[in-house]
Image (tube, rainbow, N blue to C red):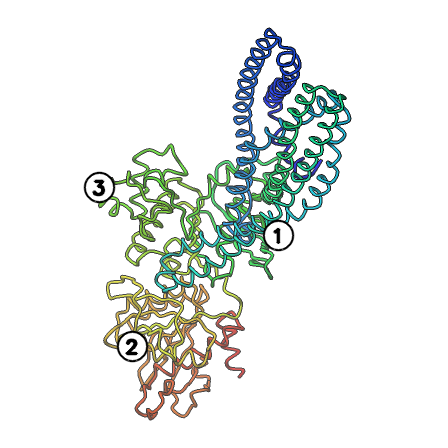
Amino acid sequence: MDQDFRRALRFILPHWRRLALVLALSVASTALSLYLPLLSRDFVDRALIGRDMATLVRVVVIFAAVSVAAFLVNVASGLRYTRVSADILFDMRLEMYRHLQRLSPRFYARTRMGDIMSRINNDIGEIQRIAAETALAWVGNVLFLAGTMVMLAWLDVRLFAVTIATAPLGLWALVHFRRRFEREVAELRQRSADIGSFLIETLQATRLVVASSAETREVARFGERNASFVRALMSMQVMAYLSGGLPGLIAGAGGGLVFVYGGVRVIHGAMTVGTFVAFMAYQMRFMPPLQALMGMYANLATVRVSLRRVAEILDEPIEIVEAAGAAPLGAVRGDVAFDEVTVTYGRGGPVLERLSFEVRAGETVAIVGPSGSGKSTIADLLLRLIDPDEGRVRIDGRDLRGVPLADLRSRVALVEQEPCILHATLLENIRYARPDASDDEVTAAVRQAALAPFVATLPDGLQTIVGERGTALSAGERQRVAIARALLRQPDVLVLDEPSAALDPESERRIADGYASVMRGRTTIVITHRLDLAARADRVIDLTVPGTVRVAVIDSGVHASHPHVGGVAGGVAIDADGRETDDYVDRLGHGTAVAAAIREKAPDAELYAVRVFDRTLSTGIASLVQAIDWAARAGMHVANLSLGTSTSAHAPILRDAVTRATAAGLIIVSARQDEGVRWLPGSLPDVVPVELDWSCPRDAYRHACVDGVTVFRASGYARPIPGVPPERNLHGISFAVANLSGFVARARADHATLDAVVRALTAC
């Protein structure tokens, strides 16, 4: 038996009793139908030619009774089969759905959603259509054809021999075109999947298409895919006619030979008229099922392609399998550890390579790094959506491979970067992961996710329908719904994958403030590129590719679009009251010139703007300390701090800030003295001190030992502006610090500690 149909038996066999009843009814219906042509012999020879009225009445009564009985049995058989075939196909669709739920993100990373949907809808739908319309008809036709052949051979074996004489030629035509037809069907399925994928992709990106004025271009692309589909459809139809119609045409030619030969036998008295009429009645019934079976072959070839495409999904290996001896976690503290973890998606090098880190119970840790560095893969590993290729992921010392999946996922909650919002009410979306949550718990989660003010504006409140994929909500509102859903679960470990990517600064601050109370005592892992959020974490784990250095420019902000700056990766603004926003745009020009000087010396560095003053070159000590702390918590490697303060009373608080920053790996570059004035924090230990040296070229620096401290001296000129003389360009101690910060950033790419950077700089 063909392998594709053997696969289908796995879904058919559980229903064999119901199918046996259908088969019995089909046999009964076929037997009744086969009896009807035989009545024509008695009707012609005895009732008409023999002028027997009793036989005429008897034949008519029997004919009517058998016809009604055959109809009723056929209806019962058809209805029973339709129900059982629907149940079989539901089992197949359900298994495919369950299997897709268990496949890892690796599968979805390499498979188009349109192709998956094509197999679930089109291929299983085609199987269901053929199963409902063709399979029972195929059984009935086979039974009827076999019975008809027996009756034809019984009535006249010579005529029967003529009837089947052309069968080998018809079978040859059927087999000859079979494989070509299957290839055409497979090609048609793929072209249909291409259209589905295109529609899903472009309809989800409608705003981008319209905003880019790309409607005409996308219509043209759709036309190209549709043209490919039509070409495949026409080619498949040609093969369908050749594989189904040509054998039927050959069989029809054989029927013509029967008319000629049978007529000759009647004329010569070798066969009665009644027998010939009965034979021709069977002959007429012989042709339709034979032609139908030949035509059904096209359907069977189609269903074989669909079965094969469904099997490709079902054969996809399940990566995450629960261990036989998996034991529940029990009470969870929340210690998380990654031990030498390596993950690859089969697209080149590993996404994570020998990654190790620990998160203590109740600690909040930020995971930062550029796109593609594996941040979101960490979330997949913690939920065990994938397993590492090498290494282990542990909670409370337990390898996740030995923990029941349901137990693990009840303890770890995830807020995704692009949250899934269902076409349901707000309440149903929030309660999705915990349907038994009380109204008070839902209200608390809504409040903690900063969603309450928005809900209060809705006439239907939490009963508001949000639309498919949450289209009735803004991006930020969808994010807050997802956060409320996660908080409602009261997890022991909370994983936030870019939770504030779509939020405005004010909403981000409200949610971050809510985390402080909600996550107290819970382990929280924040995967983010928003340094405002990372700066609130207890620690920052950096997945940046070795050699990439992040520099915080603590100044008047930065104009990211300035050609000499070359863009910034992010930043923050800190006002006199300590409020933080993401409005770090430079309105003074000073910070932009500083950033340009750093970029000139360290072109590969990532620059982050920290705006602590706006219209004047001054700020308060509290803002200065907050800026240093922000840079340390946000995982900066180097902080450029031009002057600071000359007030000696601020030394203790700045010394504490420098100590915290140094412990976090931050290197602060700042002015030591200028025009006889000692500056803080530049004159404190563990800071790279800078003095102005007008004789030093802009592309060089000097160093000297002063009072046992290595002091660096650099040019006070900023990056030159074409057409502007040096004396009229921006200049001073700020640019000596900026120039040296660029050199420090270059050295930091190769040396991790402050001492190593200083040794590297003094060795030059």
Question: Looking at the rendering, in which quadrant would you find the N terminus?
Answer: top right
Q: Is residue 593 left or right of residue 64?
A: left
Label 2 environment density (alpha carbons within 10 Å; few <14, some 14–19, many ≥20) = some
Q: Which residue is most to the front? A: 267
What amino acid is labelled 2 in the image?
Ser
Q: Looking at the image, do the residues carrying marks 3 and 2 touch, with CB atoms under 8 Å apart?
A: no
Q: Which of the two discs, 3 and 2, labels the residue nearer the N terminus?
A: 3
What amino acid is labelled 3 in the image?
Pro
In this rendering, the label closer to the viewer, 3 or 2: 3
Residue at label 3? 459
Q: Residue at x 58, y 15 (%)?
A: 63
Q: Is residue 440 left or right of residue 375?
A: left
Q: Residue at x 52, y 66 (%)?
A: 545
Q: Is residue 568 left or right of residue 332?
A: left
- Gap in angstroms between the C-alphas marked 3 and 2: 57 Å
Provide residue 380's location: percent of width, then percent of height. 51, 49
Residue at label 1? 389
Say if residue 152 shows up in the picture.
yes
What amino acid is labelled 1 in the image?
Asp
> Is residue 722 placed above or below 333 in the rendered structure?
below
Residue at label 2? 646
Q: Which of the two discs, 1 and 3, labels the residue nearer the N terminus?
A: 1
Between 669 and 483, the one nearer to me in the picture: 483
